[in-house]
Amino acid sequence: RRFQAAAAPYDQATAVQREIADALARAITAAGVTQGGRVLELGCGTGHLTRALLPRLEPSLWIASDIAPAMLIALRRDLEHPALTTALIDASWPDSEPGFDLVWSSLTLQWLADPAAVVDRWRALVRSGGLLAFSTLLDGSFGQWRQAVTTAGEPEPGPALPALTDWQAWLGPCARIRTVDLVERHADGLAFLKAARKAGVDASLERPLSAGAMRRALKSFEAGGATITYRAALIVLR
């Protein structure tokens, strides 16, 4: 529901998400992927990742999927390609037939329960020799706001995010993992919360706060510079 509501303002509020998608696209290009192959994209949103890589691959089939219909409508409105099709798919349990040359996703996995199990399902969709690639947020993301809330005397807002060491243990030594830290600056605390709502990520940051606790959290956040850090892992598996 959050991302459904965020579809209209999403592109204007997600510069960091676009930068991470571009970085993942470069990592996939460097790893080497079959030209003219079959691609499944999970959690495509309005198409940050699609636009970043589709022109480079010229696939025979590209399925861009999301669980929010409004995101797919926005993507189809702004992007056309003869190989591109869209599908309403729950990335936690994709029901596509296996055999893709590339399965990938940017900043979707952290919203799903049991991410290690989800990645195993994604891997099963990739043909032998193909690529699975995704970016996901790590522990430490949104740390400034989490700290501001605890400073206000409230429990830290969730969800808990995996650490880099978790992913290394889950995937083993064959995974190529690179981390990136990106800082987003805001005019004040309210500007940050509004931007989070436009990007659909506010569900991960909000906790019912009294008016007094909210004022204390905003004051602490602004005293720290009104910045937010996104810590992401870029992961590629053959």
Image (cartoon, rainbow, N blue to C red):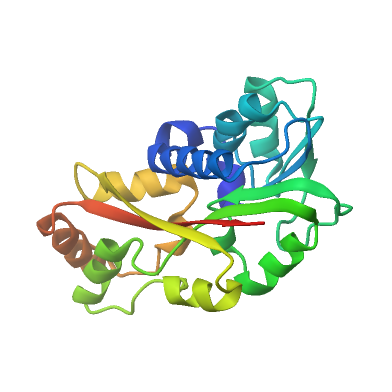
Camera-side residue of 217 and 144:
144
Residue 114 can be seen, yes or no = no
The front one of 93 and 215 is 93
Tell me how many marks there are: 0
| Near-viewer residue (198 or 123) | 123
Residue 105 makes an appearance in the image: yes
Give the image location of residue 50, x and y in percent.
62, 34
Quadrant of the drawing holding the C terminus? bottom right
Q: Where is residue 128 in the image (x, y as percent from the top left)?
A: 80, 56
Judge left or right: residue 35 versus residue 176. right
Q: Residue at the location (69% across, 73% down)?
A: 117
| Front position in the image: 120 or 204 | 120
Look at the picture and state if 147 lies above or below 195: below
- Residue 35 on image: x %, y %: 73, 32
Q: For residue 191, which quarter of the picture?
A: top left
87 lies above or below 135: above
- Residue at the extreme right: 97
Q: Residue 214, located in which quarter of the rendered image?
A: bottom left
- Residue 68 point in image, percent of width and height: 68, 46
**Compared with residue 157, is residue 37 higher up or lower down, i.e. above or below?**
above
Identify which residue is drawn at 71% across, 63% down.
Answer: 92
Residue in the picture at 74% in, 56% down: 90
